C-alpha cells in the first residue's frame, strides 16, 4: 500500500511535500496554437528582420526565430507576449548576421590591401580549363606535379594517400587529358 508523501517513516526524515506539476497542454492543441501564432506573427517578424538585417536574410532569420519558439513552445506560449520573445530572438539573430557580414567585409578589405598573390598558371590553349574538368584528385595530382614539380612521394604526402594511389591519380589524369586534347585537336 502506498504511503502518504508526508508520513513519518519510523524516525527517518519526512519526504518532501508533493508539488503538483504545472498543467500541460496536449501536443495536438499546442501544435494548433503554435500554427495560429506562426501565421499571425510571420509577416511582422520578417518585417522586423528586414529592417535590422536587410531583405536578403530576413525570411531566413524569421524562420529561425520561429523555429526556436516552436522548440520551446510549451514555455513560450505561457508568456504574456510570446510575439515579443520571438521578435527579440529575430533581432538578436539579425544583429549577429550584421556583425558577421561587417566582420567579413573588414577581412576582405584587409586582404584586398595586401600584396597581390602570384599569377595563376597561364592558360595554354585551354589546358588548365581541361584540368579543372577532371575529377578533383586527378586535377590536384596534375597541378601539383606540373606546377610545383612534386615527386610521387611528395604528391602522396600532399594528397594524403599511398604513393601507388597518387601515381594512379596522376596516370588517370594524364590519360583523360590526352583523350580530351586529342578530341580538341580533331575539332
Image (cartoon, rainbow, N blue to C red):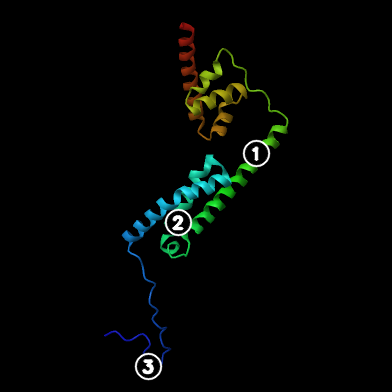
Residue 60 drawn at (x, y percent): 49, 44
Task: State the residue in front, 117 or 90.
Answer: 90
**Residue on which the image places disc 2:** 69
Pointer 2 or 3: first along the chain:
3
Label 1, label 2: how many angstroms apart (C-alpha)?
A: 31 Å
At numbered mark 3, what does the secondary structure look like: helix, strand or loop? loop
**Residue on which the image places disc 3:** 10
Image vertical order of residue 154 relative to residue 100, above or below: above
Image vertical order of residue 85 relative to residue 144, above or below: below
- Of circles 3 and 1, the one toward us is 1
Label 2, label 3: how many angstroms apart (C-alpha)?
A: 48 Å
Residue 186 drawn at (x, y percent): 46, 6
At numbered mark 2, what does the secondary structure look like: helix, strand or loop? helix
Q: Residue furthest top?
A: 186
Residue 163 drawn at (x, y percent): 52, 30
Q: Residue furthest bottom?
A: 11
The residue positioned 56% from the left and 12% from the top of the image is: 125
**Residue on which the image places disc 1:** 105
- Of circles 1 and 2, the one toward us is 2
* Horizontal side of residue 156 vs 119, given as left or right: left
Amino acid at each position: 500500500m502506498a504511503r502518504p508523501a508526508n508520513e513519518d517513516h519510523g524516525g527517518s526524515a519526512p519526504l518532501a511535500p508533493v508539488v503538483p506539476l504545472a498543467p500541460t497542454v496536449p501536443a495536438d492543441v499546442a501544435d494548433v496554437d503554435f500554427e495560429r501564432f506562426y501565421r499571425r506573427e510571420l509577416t511582422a517578424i520578417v518585417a522586423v528582420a528586414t529592417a535590422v538585417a536587410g531583405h536578403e536574410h530576413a525570411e531566413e532569420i524569421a524562420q529561425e526565430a520561429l523555429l526556436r519558439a516552436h522548440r520551446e513552445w510549451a514555455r513560450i506560449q505561457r508568456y504574456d507576449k510570446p510575439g515579443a520573445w520571438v521578435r527579440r530572438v529575430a533581432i538578436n539573430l539579425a544583429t549577429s548576421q550584421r556583425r558577421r557580414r561587417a566582420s567579413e567585409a573588414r577581412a576582405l578589405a584587409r586582404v584586398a590591401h595586401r600584396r597581390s598573390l602570384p599569377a595563376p598558371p597561364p592558360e595554354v590553349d585551354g589546358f588548365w580549363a581541361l584540368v579543372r574538368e577532371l575529377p578533383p584528385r586527378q586535377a590536384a595530382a596534375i597541378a601539383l606535379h606540373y606546377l610545383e614539380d612534386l615527386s610521387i612521394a611528395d604528391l602522396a604526402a600532399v594528397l594524403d594517400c599511398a604513393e601507388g594511389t597518387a601515381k594512379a591519380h596522376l596516370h588517370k589524369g594524364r590519360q583523360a587529358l590526352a583523350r580530351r586534347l586529342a578530341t580538341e585537336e580533331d575539332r
